[in-house]
């Protein structure tokens, strides 16, 4: 039984004002060829299929066309679970229709746990594996808030509730007496993050321990964009995003994971490298150094224009450096998306920073600098950072409830607990 694990496509993402549609199209073409090449029986997409809860029309078209085209390959079973960027309502609106195309969509946690148990067939058409298709879990899905709980109590209660949800679904799946796969879309303890990953704070729970997962044969995770094992356990994996979603992801190769399941042995896991469809490069130094680095770039190695981030270690780039930088990339298949000034910890750098624009900084950098202006102890800084990240996570999380739906007291209390700032 061969299962392909991928996640975090983020269809519809705009990167510094640029569409990723050409890269996603190239990735999907490669993926369809790969499933035939490796005789894949089923595919699991572990969350964040879309970048926002209201994806643009071209992203929906890519999604629907991929599902149709997958049926023309040897891989005719697809499981999609929702991530924190996905809207439960958006994913579920076409769920019944896509079921006719052998696609099982789990946009969010449902009351009927059987909805999250999917039996997959092997190449002989016989049951070959069972999947605990668990999506991104929101606190309201598994936990009722209780007045008077402090942050530690809330964290313990939520971790226990999520672990219990996994165990209940796993119990239903294990009754099938088949190799078992569990999915998840969350941050695990020790997981390595990148710029493009905003920390998920599920209520007050920042990371889920690997020891709390059920004893599935393989655990297919999404959310972290860097492919990695969890706690050095070979069978608990993040596949990572198929394309780099930030400049700091360019140093690591991108991959999907081919998982071969056998009831008599541990799963065999093969990392399949994804080609680079567009290069993203981050260059640092003075103008001379950057010119030398640009001369080394083979901008003909990919059809798509190479995107650049430059960090310049010199002054007055707002007036003097724009023309030289433009001349460096002129008539080449290169485009500069961001120019940043090197951060230095001296008085001269403070004067240069006063000339910075907000375009050079992301919201996290602005908040971090604001904290540095205050005399705060480490505990208070940590508390403020957690509160800030909770707010950012709620901005990313799609609101699937109608605006005119009345809130009862329990829902209001629940939302308050999820967004409460422990400052």
Image (tube, rainbow, N blue to C red):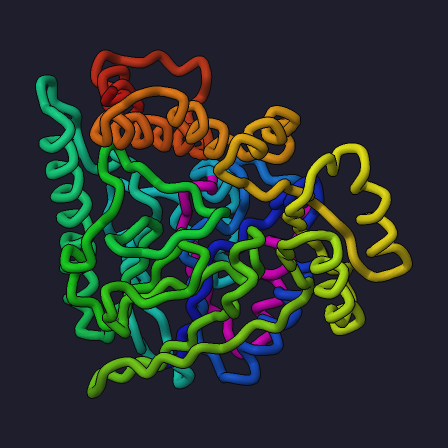
The number of callouts visible is 0
Quarter occupied by the C terminus: top left
Q: Give the image location of residue 166, x and y in percent.
A: 19, 53
**Left or right: 345 in relation to 336:** left
Which residue sits furthest right? 331
Q: Residue at x 73, y 68 (%)?
A: 297
Could you say which is closer to the camera, residue 323 or residue 34?
Answer: 323
Q: Residue at x 54, y 49 (%)?
A: 10
Q: Which residues are magenta?
A: 58-86
Q: Is residue 129 above or below residue 231?
A: below
Q: Is residue 233 above or below residue 63?
A: below
Could you say which is closer to the camera, residue 112 or residue 349?
Answer: 349
Asked where in the image residue 149 lies, by quadrant, the reply is top left
Q: Give the image location of residue 7, x and y in percent.
A: 46, 58
Q: Is residue 341 above or below residue 280?
A: above
Quarter occupied by the N terminus: bottom left
Let me know if residue 140 appears in the view. Answer: no
Q: Residue at x 59, y 30 (%)?
A: 353
Q: Is residue 365 magenta?
A: no
Q: Give the image location of residue 340, x and y in percent.
A: 64, 42
**Left or right: 4 in relation to 417:** right
Q: Is residue 81 magenta?
A: yes
Asked where in the image residue 107 lies, by quadrant, the reply is top left
Let me know if residue 366 appears in the view. Answer: yes
Asked where in the image residue 45 lies, by quadrant, the reply is bottom left
**Left or right: 328 in relation to 21:** right
**Left or right: 370 in relation to 278:** left
Could you say which is closer to the camera, residue 387 or residue 86?
Answer: 387
Q: Residue at x 62, y 54 (%)?
A: 284
Q: Give the image location of residue 401, x and y in percent.
A: 41, 25
């Amino acid at each position: 039984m061969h299962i392909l694990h991928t996640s975090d496509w983020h269809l519809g993402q705009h990167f510094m004002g640029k569409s990723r549609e050409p890269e996603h199209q190239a990735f999907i073409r490669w993926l369809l060829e790969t499933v035939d090449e490796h005789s894949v029986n089923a595919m699991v997409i572990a969350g964040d299929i879309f970048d926002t809860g209201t994806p643009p029309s071209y992203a929906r078209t890519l999604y629907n066309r991929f599902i149709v085209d997958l049926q023309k390959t040897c891989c005719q079973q697809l499981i999609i679970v929702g991530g924190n960027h996905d809207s439960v309502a958006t994913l579920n609106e076409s769920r019944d229709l896509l079921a006719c195309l052998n696609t099982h969509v789990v946009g969010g946690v449902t009351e009927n746990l059987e909805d999250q148990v999917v039996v997959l067939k092997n190449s002989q058409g016989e049951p070959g594996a069972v999947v605990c298709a668990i999506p991104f879990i929101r606190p309201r899905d598994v936990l009722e808030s209780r007045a008077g709980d402090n942050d530690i109590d809330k964290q313990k209660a939520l971790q226990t509730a999520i672990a219990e949800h996994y165990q209940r679904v796993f119990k239903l799946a294990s009754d099938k007496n088949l190799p078992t796969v569990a999915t998840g879309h969350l941050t695990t303890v020790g997981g390595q993050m990148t710029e493009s990953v905003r920390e998920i704070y599920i209520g007050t729970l920042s990371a889920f321990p690997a020891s709390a997962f059920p004893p599935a044969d393989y655990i297919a995770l999404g959310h972290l964009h860097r492919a990695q094992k969890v706690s050095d356990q070979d069978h608990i994996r993040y596949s990572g995003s198929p394309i780099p979603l930030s400049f700091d992801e360019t140093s690591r190769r991108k991959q999907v994971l081919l998982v071969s399941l056998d009831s008599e042995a541990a799963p065999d896991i093969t990392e399949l490298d994804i080609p680079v469809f567009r290069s993203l490069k981050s260059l640092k130094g003075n103008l001379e150094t950057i010119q030398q680095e640009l001369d080394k770039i083979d901008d003909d190695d990919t059809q798509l224009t190479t995107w650049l981030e430059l960090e310049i270690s010199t002054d007055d780039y707002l007036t003097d450096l724009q023309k030289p930088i433009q001349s460096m990339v002129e008539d080449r298949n290169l485009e500069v998306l961001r120019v940043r000034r090197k951060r230095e910890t001296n008085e001269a750098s403070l004067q240069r920073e006063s000339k910075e624009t907000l375009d050079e900084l992301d919201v996290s950098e602005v908040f971090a600098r604001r904290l540095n202006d205050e005399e705060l102890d480490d505990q208070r800084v940590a508390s403020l950072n957690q509160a800030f990240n909770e707010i950012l996570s709620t901005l990313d999380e799609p609101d699937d409830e109608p605006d005119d739906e009345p809130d009862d007291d329990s829902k209001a209390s629940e939302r308050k607990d999820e967004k409460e700032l422990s400052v």
